[in-house]
Image (cartoon, rainbow, N blue to C red):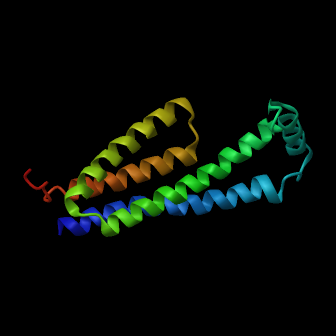
Amino acid sequence: MAELHLRRGIRFAASVFLISAGMHAMAHYQYYVADLFADERRRAVVEAMQSYVIVPRFGTTMWTLHCMFSASFAVFLILTGTAYWWMAKDMPLQKLRPLATASAWLCFAATVLVSLAYPVLQTVLILLLAALGFSYAAWRGRGITRPAL
């Protein structure tokens, strides 16, 4: 039974990442591509960001950097969710519980750090829900022990 809970908890965390990736990708499209010049205020912000050049040689502006980080966030959520889903499916149990424990600690630490430094609700909730899924996996999978060396 511990194996089922362990794998289910990690799959939950992976699902949080994958669902969040889809939601963020749609929001990225809506805010950065489809409605780029929807109103005067947004147009003014975009023009101001485009006028601030960060790397002149490559034509990188504050706007392109901002868009890149938004798209990268969705891509990293997809990669993370996919990797954890496969690990929950195929990884041996003796290695899966330490992974869940370490992932829970990292996600909880990241939740606190992001909450204090850059409190964006979407990111805080993604990290918190993933941390809860990993914690569930580590706690309910505690009957699984490491093999003796």
* Residue 59 placement (x, y as % from top left): 83, 38
Q: In the rendered view, does 147 fall on the left or right side of 55?
A: left
How many numbered discs, if any? 0
* Residue 92 placement (x, y as % from top left): 24, 64
Instruction: Please tell me which residue is depicted at 54% across the width and 30% down the height of the picture.
Output: 117
* Residue 95 placement (x, y as % from top left): 24, 56
Residue situated in front as seen by the camera: 91 or 15: 91
Residue situated in front as seen by the camera: 46 or 39: 46
Q: Quadrant of the N terminus?
A: bottom left
* Residue 136 placement (x, y as % from top left): 29, 56
Q: In the rendered view, does 25 fall on the left or right side of 119?
A: right
Q: Please, which residue is most extreme toward the right here?
A: 40
Q: Which quadrant holds residue 35?
A: bottom right
Instruction: Please tell me which residue is depicted at 7% across the width and 52% down the height of the picture.
Output: 148
Instruction: Please tell me which residue is depicted at 40% across the width and 60% down the height of the picture.
Output: 84
- Where 102 falls versus 137 (above or below)? above
- Where 15 falls versus 37 (above or below)? below
Q: In the rendered view, does 37 fall on the left or right side of 135?
A: right
Residue situated in front as seen by the camera: 145 or 125: 145
Instruction: Please tell me which residue is depicted at 50% across the width and 30% down the height of the picture.
Output: 116
Q: Please, which residue is most extreme toward the front here?
A: 57
- Where 149 falls versus 34 (above or below)? above
- Where 31 falls versus 58 (above or below)? below
